[in-house]
């Protein structure tokens, strides 16, 4: 496979990307008449060399676009290069915002002092309110919190529920201990009776 041309062959011939073979042929004919070295009567060698280069570009573009397999290969290469360029731009854009994210070490340091369950029970704020579920739930001094009165009642009932749950756990633990004690005593008696 030859290397793809440095210029867009569609632009060189002045045709759209979905041009038919007939459109490509007619555009090629017009440009050949304007750029062919034998058709152009120019005395200046610099202009003649320029026209020769233009003619070669037109020929290369025509040969590429008139051959269906080469044209398809070129179109796929252009699409792939465009995708790569877009991905590279997205990565570059993402790298610009890397400084916004903190490193894992900074995260650990920042979060290390807020361990709400160190003693096995969740902590609450000093004023009796439960910890916020998001940064917007934090009560601001001087501002009226819309659910503060409800939260006050809720916290007292929560304390009662916690006390009830604690008592239930104690009762259950005591029941289990007494059951184990009875079972142990039965096993001992059986051992002595035999």
Image (cartoon, rainbow, N blue to C red):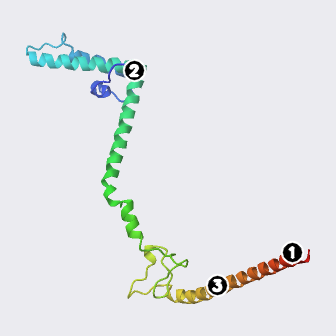
Asked whether, in this view, residue 52 is left or right of residue 90, the answer is left
Foreground disc of the pair 2, 3: 3
Can you say whether 133 is above or below 153 in the image?
Answer: above
Residue 87 in the image: state x and y as whole percent.
37, 43
What numbered label is drawn on residue 166? 3
Residue 6 in the image: state x and y as whole percent.
27, 27
Asked whether, in this view, residue 151 is left or right of residue 186, the answer is left
When asked about the image quadrant of residue 139, the answer is bottom left
Can you say whether 79 is above or below 50 in the image?
Answer: below
Disc 2 secondary structure class: helix
State which tag comes first along the sequence, 2 or 3.
Answer: 2
The N terminus: image quadrant: top left
Disc 3 secondary structure class: helix
Which residue is farthest top? 38
Residue bearing mark 2: 70
Q: Are marks 2 and 3 in contact (CB under 8 Å)?
A: no
Residue bearing mark 1: 191
Disc 1 secondary structure class: helix
Which is nearer the eye, 98 or 85?
98
Which is nearer the eye, 64 or 149?
149
The C terminus: image quadrant: bottom right
Instruction: Give the spatial CA distance, label 2 vs label 3.
Output: 80 Å
Instruction: Give the spatial CA distance, label 1 vs label 3.
Output: 38 Å
Which is nearer the eye, 91 or 111?
111
Foreground disc of the pair 1, 2: 1
Label 1 environment density (alpha carbons within 10 Å; few <14, some 14–19, many ≥20): few
Asked whether, in this view, residue 144 is left or right of residue 12, the answer is right
**Residue at the spot x=88%, y=77% of the render?**
192
**Residue at the spot x=74%, y=81% of the render?**
177
């Amino acid at each position: 496979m030859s290397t793809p041309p440095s210029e867009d062959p569609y632009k060189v011939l002045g045709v759209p990307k979905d041009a038919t073979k007939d459109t490509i042929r007619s555009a090629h004919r017009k440009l050949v008449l304007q750029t062919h070295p034998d058709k152009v009567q120019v005395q200046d060698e610099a202009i003649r060399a320029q026209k020769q280069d233009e003619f070669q570009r037109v020929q290369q573009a025509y040969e590429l676009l008139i051959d269906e397999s080469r044209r398809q290969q070129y179109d796929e290469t252009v699409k792939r290069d465009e995708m790569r360029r877009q991905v590279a731009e997205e990565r570059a854009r993402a790298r610009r915002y890397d400084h916004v994210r903190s490193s894992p070490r900074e995260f650990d340091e920042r979060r290390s002092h807020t361990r709400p369950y160190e003693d096995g029970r969740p902590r609450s704020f000093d004023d009796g309110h439960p910890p916020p579920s998001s940064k917007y739930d934090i009560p601001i001094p001087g501002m009226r919190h819309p659910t503060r009165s409800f939260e006050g009642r809720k916290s007292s009932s929560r304390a009662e529920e916690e006390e009830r749950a604690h008592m239930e756990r104690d009762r259950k633990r005591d029941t289990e201990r007494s059951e184990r004690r009875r079972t142990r005593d039965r096993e001992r008696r059986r051992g002595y009776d035999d």
